[in-house]
Image (tube, rainbow, N blue to C red):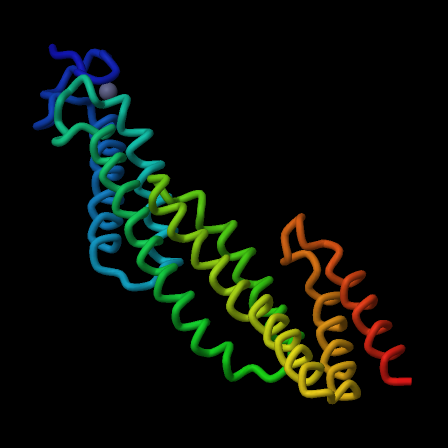
Amino acid sequence: MDNCKHCGINVSYSVSKFGMCKLCEDIFQREIQILTESKDIINHTKNISTLLNRCQIALKVLERLKVFEHLELIHPPPAQIMKDIEEKRSEFVSEYWEDYCSELTQKLTRYESLDSVIKKIEETKSLFDKYKVHLNSQKQLNEAEHWVYFLISDHIIGGYNTLVREAKDYEKNGDNKSAVKKLNEALKCFEKTKNYFGEQNQNLDIELKDWITRISTKSI
Ligand SMILES: [Zn+2]
């Protein structure tokens, strides 16, 4: 008579090759199979949803496999494999995010309306919230965040600055009517996108309105 190395139950028949009873061995083998399949997919997929999904499955399996750790059948130990998977996931997400944002920044130049730019940026921000939890290092997190700021500054604040610059040029050349037109466009742009402008810039609309009044008075 032998004992299952895992659950300790007495088995009247010979124990399996891993020294476990049939039930424990079946569970163990099944978990190892899921883990192997998942690791294979993690190493080969190019699809972020598949990768995230498989990492989650593998990590759950590894968590359950920890109870078998005392048998020393898994090399490296589950905790180490978990660390490796989390690192791999972080790298994948980091690279994916860079590609996603740089592609988007090229695409955004083709969007005509401010509304569609805002829509895309909002989508990007919520995607970022979804992915950032998988980024392991502060460096990767900073880089990923930088891409979001870059999109906002390039496509929203940049657009606003262009309108203001054009207004200045018109004013300098004495074309006050065109200057006011540009300032009104800038004002509309600011009102729609105020939340992207940072705390210290929340009164730009007051400045613009004063400016418009000043030029309009000058015109009369
Ligand atoms: Zn057992």
Closest to the observer, 201 or 114 = 201
Ligand 1 is found in the corner quadrant, namely: top left
Horizontal side of residue 213 vs 34, given as left or right: right
Residue at the (65%, 77%) spot, across then down: 163
Q: Nearer the viewer, residue 75 or 6?
A: 75
Q: Is residue 28 left or right of residue 198?
A: left
Q: Residue at x 70, y 60 (%)?
A: 194
Give coordinates of residue 144: x percent, y percent: 41, 53
- Point out residue 68 in the picture as x, y percentages from the top left corner: 23, 23
Dividing the picture into quadrants, the one containing residue 18 is top left
Q: Position of residue 46 (x, y in %)?
A: 28, 63
Quarter of the rendering occupied by the N terminus = top left
Nearest to the observer: residue 69 or residue 214: 214
For the C terminus, the image quarter is: bottom right
Answer left or right for 167 relative to 67: right
Q: Residue at x 30, y 40 (%)?
A: 86
Taking the spot 44% from the left edge, 43% from the top edge, the residue there is 133
How many numbered discs sit on the rendered protein?
Answer: 0
Q: Residue furthest right?
A: 220
* Above-or-below relation of 128 to 112: above
The vertical placement of 50 against 33, above or below, is below
Does 115 sit above or below residue 149? Answer: below
Q: Position of residue 87 (x, y in %)?
A: 27, 42
Asked where in the image residue 66 lies, by quadrant, the reply is: top left
Quick one: 12 or 132, which is closer to the camera? 132
| Lateral position of residue 115 relative to residue 12, left or right | right
